[in-house]
Amino acid sequence: MKPDPNHSLRKHLANLLEKAEAHADARATLKDFPAALRGQKPKGSPHTPWQLLEHMRLAQWDILKFSVDAAHVSPKFPEGYWPQHGSPADAAAWNQSVKQFLADLDAMKSLVSDPATDLFAPIPHGDGQAILREALLLADHNSYHLGQLIFLRRILEEK
C-alpha cells in the first residue's frame, strides 16, 4: 500500500474540525451547558443557545449528507436551518441535538481522515464542490456559531 500523499492535510482538517487550537472546542462548549440558559435570549441577541445549537446541527447534517449522498435534499433556506422554537422541549431534546451534532462532526472527521476519500475531486452530484471545500465550510460555520454560543453563555451567566 502506497503512502497517502495527503496524510498531513487530512490530519490538519481533522484537527480543524474538532480540536480547540485557534477555534472553540465543540465538545467542551456543549458539555454541561446550563439547562436554565438554553432557551434564554439576552436583549439584542437574535438567537437563543438552543436556536444556535439546532442551527449548527442542521447545517452540519446538511453539509455532511450532501458530501456523501447523491439523493440528499437540502432543507429550504433559510427556514429549514433554524428551529421553530426558541427553547428545547426538554433536556432530552437538547441532549439528543448535542449527541447528533457530535456524531455528525465525527462522521465528517472520519470522511476527511479516510485515505480513500479524494479531498479534491468534485462531488459528482454537486456543482463544483469538493470534500475539502465542504470540510472547510463546516469548520468555519461551526467555529462562528460556537463563538456565538460561548458569548451568549457568558452574557446569560452575568444576569
Image (cartoon, rainbow, N blue to C red):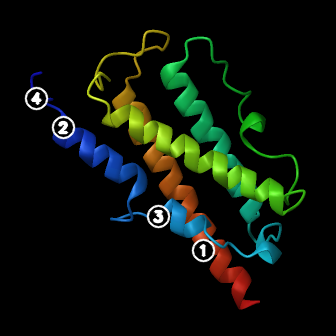
Amino acid type, label 3: Asp
Q: Residue at x 57, y 50 (%)?
A: 102
Q: Are marks 2 and 3 in contact (CB under 8 Å)?
A: no
Q: Are marks 1 and 2 in contact (CB under 8 Å)?
A: no
SS of the residue at dot 3? Answer: loop
SS of the residue at dot 1? Answer: helix
Neighbourhood count class around disc 1 (C-alpha, 10 Å): few under 14, some 14–19, many 20 upward: few
Image coordinates of residue 41 in percent, x first then y, are: 80, 70
User: Which disc, if any, is residue 7?
Assistant: 2
Q: Which residue is mark 1?
A: 151
Amino acid type, label 2: His
Image coordinates of residue 28 in percent, x first then y, are: 52, 69
Give me the C-alpha separation between circle 1 and circle 2.
Answer: 35 Å
Figure quadrant of the C terminus: bottom right
**Which mark is in front, 2 or 3?**
2
Mark 3 vs 4, N-terminal side: 4
Q: Which residue is mark 4?
A: 3
Neighbourhood count class around disc 3 (C-alpha, 10 Å): few under 14, some 14–19, many 20 upward: some
Q: Residue at x 12, y 30 (%)?
A: 5
